[in-house]
Amino acid sequence: MSIKSWALPLILFTVSSSSFANQGEYLQHEGDEYDYRPTPLANQVADLKDDDNDGVINARDLCPDTPRGSEIDNDGCGTFIKSSQMQQLHILFANDSSVIEPAFLTQIRQMAEFLQGYPSTSIELQGYASKVGRAEYNLALSKQRSETVRDQLIRYGVAPNRVNIVGYGDSVLVAEGEDDISHARNRRVTATVVGYKGEVVKEWTIFTTLPM
């Protein structure tokens, strides 16, 4: 009976240093003893905050007030396209009054929502009066009408420093007639939005509706 001999390969197990990369390193001494030396922690010196939540940190963000959901570039700036859909504001008043009629509150609320969606913009409210009465009184009344609309915008959440007012009295008329209809058209507050670049291009999400 013959006896066969088998040569078995010697398998060596090694421990990769990468397995300890995040934990530190082990220094071998004589025999099987090891000393553990923790990896030093780095001190964070850069500002990694992202105040407008656009994915670009403040230190690199050239547009710190990007509208939420915008499609942005590497500098954190949104993309805008020309638009003719700017929000309009045209409030009419009764004679010798600065009280806002309820029918115009929706228009003011929509303007407030527009301003909140574009935080880099501001608004100037222009108040006017009809030719009825003295010019000095009409000038004060036109400013009071602007102030009333400003107060309503603030109640809807617009920051006070984003709303400027001016009164023109009866010096700028949209209707030159002396009849009641012409006077009613001149008793108004209009608005100019400052800093509006156009409609912001929104970033695509799973909820975006594609054009048909």
Image: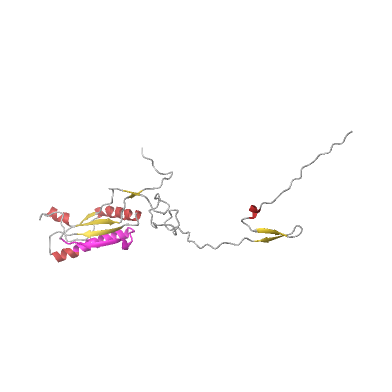
Q: Residue at x 66, y 58 (%)?
A: 25
Residue drawn at 30 percent across, 52 percent down: 110
Q: Is residue 136 magenta?
A: no
Q: How many marks?
A: 0
Left or right of 78 on screen, residue 84: left
Residue furthest toward the right? 1
Q: Main secondary structure of the magenta part?
A: helix
37 vs 6: above or below: below
Which residue in the rendered view is the most extreme toward the left?
A: 178
Residue at the extreme top: 1
Q: Quadrant of the N terminus?
A: top right
Quarter of image, res 145: bottom left
Residue name at image x 21 percent, y 63 percent: 143
Q: Quadrant of residue 58?
A: bottom left
**Residue projecting furthest to the bottom:** 136
Task: Give coordinates of residue 61: x percent, y percent.
Answer: 42, 57
From the viewer's side, name the closer residue of 136 and 69. Answer: 69
Q: How is the image coloured?
A: secondary structure
Which residue is nearer to you in this view: 169 or 107?
A: 169
Residue 148, image x and y in percent? 25, 61
Magenta stretch? 141-170
Residue 109 location (% of width, % of height):
30, 54
Q: Is residue 16 left or right of residue 180?
A: right
- Which quarter of the image is occupied by the C terminus? top left
Q: Is residue 58 shown above or below 209?
A: below
Q: Left of 24 or right of it: where is 197?
A: left
Residue 106 image offset from top left, x and y in percent: 28, 52
Could you say which is closer to the camera, residue 46 or residue 131? Answer: 46
Lateral position of residue 199 relative to residue 101, left or right: right
